[in-house]
Image: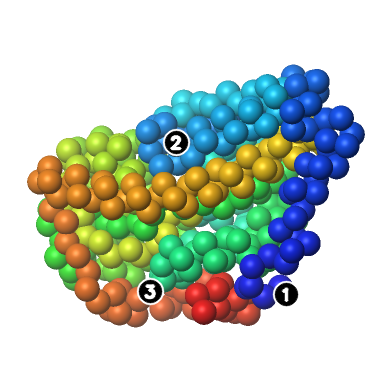
Amino acid sequence: MAGCGLKSPDAAATTAAATEAAKDQGGAGADASGDPQVTLVYAEVNPLDTIVGQTDTAFKEKVEELSGGSIKIDLQASGVLGAEGDILDAMVGHSGTVDMARLSVSSLTNYGTTKGSLLALPYVFSSREHFWKFAKSEVADQFLSETEDLGLGIKGLVYGEEGFRHFFTAKEVKSMDDLKGLKLRVSSDPVMVGTVESFGASATVVAFTELYSALQTGVVDGAEQPVANYKSNAFPEVASNMILDGHQLGLIEIVITEDAWNKLTEAQQACVIEAANYAADFNAELSEKEEGKVLEELKSSGVNIVEVDDKTPWQDAVKDVVANAIKGQEDLYQQILDCDK
């Protein structure tokens, strides 16, 4: 297996070489406007003013620019095309209704991505710097290709992140012990279910699109999201307490169906790859800046923000969840950890 150093010069040059080769064929770059016109429907469950929404927009604008307009991105945000499970079902089922999407990495675990499940484990990344070292390494390529290796008909393009995820609740939570007995919303991801239960809470599966009303009516007592998504989805209105436990880095992935990929010319494919890499760099800068800004806005608006000085008890609580999840993949998990060196 590849180590966690940065991609070799040959690997790092792949996109540039593909673009130059396409140009030599009279396709990509400024000449891509001569390629057949293609419209790709791109699904996003969050609003466009979120970190992920802005990342989507950056990708859309860049790929349309690079392709000279031969690729158009029909960006459907705010869950218009359904929850992430609905979007994945459509993509895996070759429905043709969704060509691309920005997905949470954890949502893919329900489709058998055992490698990808390692990225969603609690406390696997110690910092943003740790994650981005991983994302730009050869190790990451093994994870991005897993959906293709499994025959899901989906091609992973690039990783990104939307900040560390924290619990927010209707009543104040000052420590991990205060989570005991609370009903906390989770997706159907088994790792997150196990994580919540390790903290003594009751994991309650609720669709993201129904979360606001579930908090409002008391169906759940809380949930977890990155701070920017917490604010942009108006969750402080119904759950105005947040504890910064940082149990998971909200990892995202831009994906495209193989059906859509194969419709593109080689030149257009190069444009898509280049635009995805551009969007990842955009995302890295935006996410950190936006998280700090939003945290200050939340505090100023009266949201009760609780800092966690020592995460050791939280990490200890989920040790069994992690140990069970990495069985058979211990070496690969260690390679992720080694990216922090």
Q: Which residue does the image show at 50% across and 32% down from the upper left? A: 57
The residue indicated by pointer 3 is 318
The residue indicated by pointer 2 is 53
Query: Which circle's residue, 1 or 2, is located before the other in the chain?
Result: 1
Report the amino acid beneath label 1: Met
Q: Which residue does the image show at 63% across and 28% down from the upper left? A: 65
Instruction: Say left or right for 238 vs 1.
Output: left
Q: Which residue does the image show at 34% across and 80% down from the upper left? A: 316
Q: Which mark is residue 1?
A: 1
Rounded to the nearest angstrom, the CA distance separating label 1 from label 2 is 34 Å
Which residue occupies the foreground of this view, 327 or 297?
A: 297
Provide the secondary structure element on which disc 2 rests.
helix
Instruction: Say left or right for 22 vs 319.
Output: right
* Marks 1 and 2 in Cβ contact (< 8 Å): no
Q: Which image quarter holds the N terminus? A: bottom right
Rounded to the nearest angstrom, the CA distance separating label 3 from label 1 is 27 Å
Query: Which circle's residue, 3 or 2, is located before the other in the chain?
Result: 2
Rounded to the nearest angstrom, the CA distance separating label 3 from label 2 is 31 Å
- Note whether 187 is above or below 123 in the view shown: above
Residue 190: give x, y in percent of width and height: 47, 60
Res. 267 in view: yes
For discs 3 and 1, the disc positioned in front in the rendered view? 1
- Note whether 310 is above or below 146 in the view shown: below
Coloration mode: rainbow
Report the amino acid beneath label 3: Val
Q: Which residue does the image show at 75% across and 48% down from the upper left? A: 16
- Note whether 212 is above or below 118 in the view shown: above
Instruction: Say left or right for 122 vs 327.
Output: left
Q: Splitting the image into 4 quarters, where does residue 275 fall?
A: top right
Q: Splitting the image into 4 quarters, where does residue 207 fall?
A: top left
Q: Which mark is residue 290?
A: none
Q: Please rate how many residues cluster around mark 2, counting C-alpha atoms within 10 Å: few if below 14, some from 14 to 19, many from 20.
A: many
